[in-house]
Image (cartoon, rainbow, N blue to C red):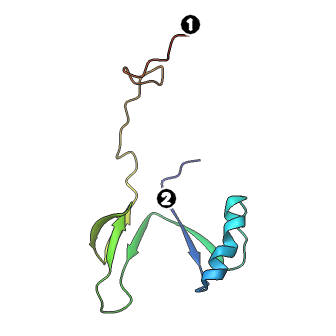
Amino acid sequence: MYEDQFELLALTSQSGLRYLSYLPSLWLGRLRGTEGVHFWKADSILCEPLGKDPIYAQVDGEPLARLPVEFKIMPRALKLLVPRNGLPARAKPAANS
């Protein structure tokens, strides 16, 4: 189900081994309710550095900006046009021979 909110996940451990122990729960879809795992929902997120050192944000691996950065949900900000049959004009199904 799609919602007009971010869903945040925080892990309270700083242990690399503990992070690895979360993987089976993640793969099985049982991360909610796991000790040390917390979820929140929000309409916007403000990311700020904790210290004076510069911290840079990335989005999908691409550089974005130096913190602080605010992310907001923009409902209906993107309009997608999809062909009625669900296939692009150039991607026609192969004919059976």
**Furthest residue to the bottom?**
52
- Quarter of the picture holding the C terminus: top right
Residue 31 visible in the displayed image: no
Relative vertical location of residue 77 with respect to residue 31 in this rendering, above or below: above
Is mark 2 in CB contact (under 8 Å) with mark 1?
no
Residue at x 68%, y 72% (from the top left corner): 22
Residue 56: % across, % down = 31, 76
Position of residue 64 in the picture relative to residue 7 (left or right)? left
Position of residue 21 in the picture relative to residue 3 (left or right)? right
The answer to which image quadrant residue 41 occupies is bottom right
**Distance Cα–Cα, label 2 vs label 1:** 48 Å
Residue 26: % across, % down = 67, 63
Relative vertical location of residue 61 with respect to residue 22 in this rendering, above or below: above
Residue 22 visible in the displayed image: yes
Residue 5: which numbered mark, if any?
A: 2
Residue at x 49%, y 17% (from the top left corner): 93
Decide which of tag 2 and tag 1 comes sooner along the chain. Answer: 2
Count neighbours of disc 1 (C-alpha within 10 A) and say few if under 14, some if 14 to 19, many if 20 or more: few
Query: As shown in the figure, which amino acid type bears the numbered disc 2?
Result: Gln
Residue 80: % across, % down = 38, 35
The answer to which image quadrant residue 52 occupies is bottom left
Residue 67: which numbered mark, if any?
A: none
Residue 97: which numbered mark, if any?
A: 1
Q: Say which of marks 2 and 1 sits in front.
A: 1
